[in-house]
Amino acid sequence: MRDQKDSIYKILRLASSVDPALFGALLIIRHVSPGFIPTYRQLTLEDMQDSRIPENDCDCTPWQIVADAPKGKVISSAIAALSAIRSHSPLFDCLTEKLKYAPPTETNELIDLIHILSHISTGNHALAEIYEVFLSSWFPSDTQLHAAKSSGDIYTPRDVSTLIWELLDLNGKTFYDPCCGSGSLLARAFLSLPLKKEVRLFGQTNDLLSYCICQTYFFLLDIPVDLAGMSGNTLVKDLHAEKQFDRIATNPPFNQARWCDSGYIYDRRWQYGIPPRSNANFAWLQHVISHLSDQGRAAVILSNGSLSAQNHAEHEIRRRILDDGLIEAIIALPPKLFFNTKVPCCIWLLRKPKVPGGPHPHD
């Protein structure tokens, strides 16, 4: 046990300089390899009798392809290993695309990382735990940090995720995070279930990197998730537009400005008023409300400014949401919970009222 913990510590230290998509690809390859069946062993009896075995097939695992790769060939070997596992899937296509354009910085640390991964236990979702800790401490570059701030695609701490699902309860059948980033908040719903009952998880990420990270995390957990097969700005392009959900939890970007390039777009989601382009807080709230099922409940983390903003549009939207009985509670959270902001924040707990007052007409 002590050796395993020491190895995990070394992995996290070495992975700190590795692109999260590459690290995720390595963990997937390692995760799949123990039970991997080479292609030629999957042929039919007739194929075997006719000796129809492809010349390029070898009796080695995908991890061996990576582990035996010479320095300078690790990324191309990882792409080959992903292809050996599965030729086409949204996740594998996404990772392959990211790796094709990854900077060719194959350091000694990367070689050491692969060596340690070769000897670590993969049972009990150990690799998923490693990836989650990696994401919780991963500090992106300036460019990636700017993207994270604007998209909200960041890691939600486990304690906050656990608190949210305890507040909502887990009696629903469908769970959704419209700004799911790494997927940690959404995954915590499934992992918190006392019994792994039949539930379905849905989410949306803002960009390709977040999509890869989220899908990788769920793959390592062996949990199915529906991300609609692509990424996209949720407020502009709702990839789950026709669906409603029993439980929704999300941690969107705080006070997001210029969330809509085309100005004040009209959308049926804005039933309580068109959100100002200068701040997306009430766009996120109305998006969540529009997706609540009849028995739906939701938790949305927003800045405290959402409680007191005096902008006329925001004031009216907030009043109308309150008048309709959608707000169950407001819970204040301490500052400095998230690496990208020190802004104090709160949780809006929402639920569909038994006798709704009905949406108000636009001004």
Image (tube, grey):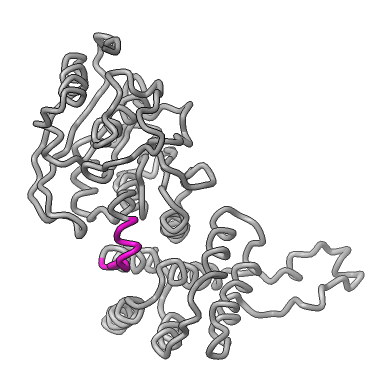
Q: Nearer the viewer, residue 211 or 169?
A: 211
| Figure quadrant of residue 172 | top left
Q: Nearer the viewer, residue 33 or 233?
A: 233
Q: Quadrant of the N terminus?
A: bottom left
Residue 217 horizontal/vertical position (percent) = 41, 58
Q: Measured along the vertical axis of the image, is residue 311 above or below residue 252?
A: above
Residue at 48% over, 73% down: 26
Q: Measured along the vertical axis of the image, is residue 40 above or below residue 323?
A: below
Residue at 30% over, 58% down: 146
Overall secondary structure of the magenta section = helix
Q: Measured along the vertical axis of the image, is residue 330 above or below residue 190?
A: above
Asked if residue 295 can be seen in this view, the reply is yes
Left or right, residue 49 beside residue 27 = right
Left or right, residue 265 beside residue 51 = left
What's the magenta region?
137-147
Q: Nearer the viewer, residue 159 or 279?
A: 279
Left or right, residue 106 beside residue 69 = left
Q: Measured along the vertical axis of the image, is residue 35 above or below residue 217?
A: below
Q: Quadrant of the C terminus?
A: top left
Q: Nearer the viewer, residue 234 or 202?
A: 234
Residue 362 horizontal/vertical position (percent) = 29, 13
Left or right, residue 126 beside residue 310 = right
Residue 240 horizontal/vertical position (percent) = 47, 33
Residue 63 horizontal/vertical position (percent) = 55, 77
Residue at 37% over, 37% down: 260
| Figure quadrant of residue 342 | bottom left
Does the magenta-highlighted stretch encompass residue 144?
Answer: yes
Which residue ends up furthest to the right in the rendered image? Answer: 50
Residue at 54% over, 56% down: 91
